[in-house]
Amino acid sequence: MAQILIVEDEELLAKSISRYLTGRGNDCFTAGSAEDGLKSLEKMQMDVALLDLQLPGMSGLEAIQKFRAQDPHLVVIISTAHGTMAAAVEAMRNGASDFLRKPLDMEEVALSVERAIANARIRQKISYYHDRDAVHEEDALICNSSKMKEVATFLEKITSMSLPHPSDYPPILILGETGTGKDLIARTAHYQSHLSDEAFIEVNCSTLPKGLEEAELFGFEKGSFTGAGSSKRGLFEAAQGGTMFLNEIGDLTPEAQVKLLQVIERKTLRRIGGLRDIPLDVRIIAATNRDLLDTRNFREDLYFRLHNLTINIPPLRERKEDIGRLSELFLKQFCRKYSVEKTLSDDARRAMAAYSWPGNVRELRQLMERVTFLSPSPEVSEPDLNLPESKFVEAAYAPTGEITVTLPERGVDIEALERAVILQALQSCKGNVSLAARKLSMGREALRYRIKKHGISITESI
């Protein structure tokens, strides 16, 4: 569906074109002159302008330039009588994408509009994703560890799905600590899927301008708030037909969460200040390093809509088998960048395998860049790494303390017993739900369900 502005001084013809294109699923607006057309463009954003060259007042040729200045992405199609073909050629030079001869054939008009929109989208993709198909070895998934092999297997199932529309795909929620590579998983889910030729729009919710989160994501109409001098598409509309990746979704404002929930449920959005719903065909991938059910401002209903397909990315300390391959990959990458040759010594490899990596893969990558140009010799040794001794796996992350429960001689209350065990596990892990879940040999979501069932507060366990 497209928003089409029909600039035609013959009122009956304008209505006829509008009726026909509306029947093809488009939204049409008419203007009797170029001046009125410019006023319409100031109020709302259009995809296509169907412009007659023979207009009262401002000429069609002049209007093309002004229309394009108002909106560089606007597709302009001109219509002209037989005697003005020279003007049609000039119009094409001025930026028109196609021309139609009068009397107009409605089927030809519709085909021209559809062709122009398709070509515009292709140009935008080429411009925005011109280097998308370049193969970056450093972006490969390293899956030597059993946990990452599970992630890769699950990801393969997701990418093998083929559905008619992007909005038919269930949302994906990617969970993991900061620096584990959630954005890489999101890109892999998109570029290895049947949507790989479509847009992939990534937005970090924590960096959205305060107070303008909704405007950035969902767009706005002119005059909808102070400073809205013209209409603007939001990032969701930019992702039309492809994938929208919402990184750090736990930072999304409550107001934006309501709109996101509507987008998922209704597959439409309404711009700020808008009066109509815009059909939206977008696949949604979200990621967070938080426990969303622990985030007071995050809507539970939105969480369960996003929770359909969940990928848990293990921290680097739990996938030691991948550290060697990742470090080699990053070192090779930075050696190319800085035109040097470096290798890792055995003692450096052992030190990295024992380190806790609180910054995960991102920290490892930064370390390899640092040693590439700071290491004094071709072979990087353990002292060159300069790893903090206080942050090694066994000391920093192993849950301590045994869980002991005293049973009465009779009349055991199973519910009370379960509550006591969970509370003791949380206390021994200082309120860390993930560590407590591992200590109890259960999934984090299963533990969270029981915490809620027994009315245990995290502050109670600290």
Image (spheres, helix red, strand yellow):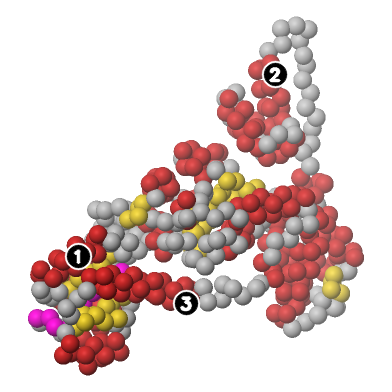
- Residue 201, compared with residue 417, is above or below; it is below
Mark nearer the viewer, 3 or 2: 3
Q: Is residue 260 left or right of residue 447?
A: left
Under tag 3, what secondary structure? helix
Q: Nearer the viewer, residue 312 or 299?
A: 312
Under tag 2, what secondary structure? helix
Three-letter amino acid code of the residue under disc 1: Ser
Inspect the magenta stretch and tell me whether residue 412 lies in it.
no
Under tag 1, what secondary structure? helix
What residue is drawn where x is 31% and y is 84%? 95
Mark nearer the viewer, 3 or 1: 1
Q: Pointer 1: what residue? A: 18
What residue is drawn where x is 90% and y is 65%? 346
Q: Nearer the viewer, residue 371 or 191?
A: 191
Q: Residue 265 in the image: state x and y as whole percent.
A: 41, 44
* Chain-order first, disc 3 or disc 2: 3
Stretch of the chain drawn in magenta: 47-56
Quarter the N terminus occupies: bottom left
Q: Residue 205 in the image: state x and y as whole percent.
A: 48, 56
Quarter the C terminus occupies: top right
Residue 239: which quarter of the image? bottom left
Q: Is disc 3 surrounded by few (<14), some (14 to 19) or many (20+) residues within 10 Å?
A: few
Residues at marks 1 and 2, CA–CA distance in whole angstroms: 71 Å
Three-letter amino acid code of the residue under disc 3: Ser
Residue 417: assigned label: 2
Q: Residue 41 in the image: state x and y as whole percent.
A: 23, 70
Residue 127: assigned label: 3
Residues at marks 3 and 2, CA–CA distance in whole angstroms: 62 Å
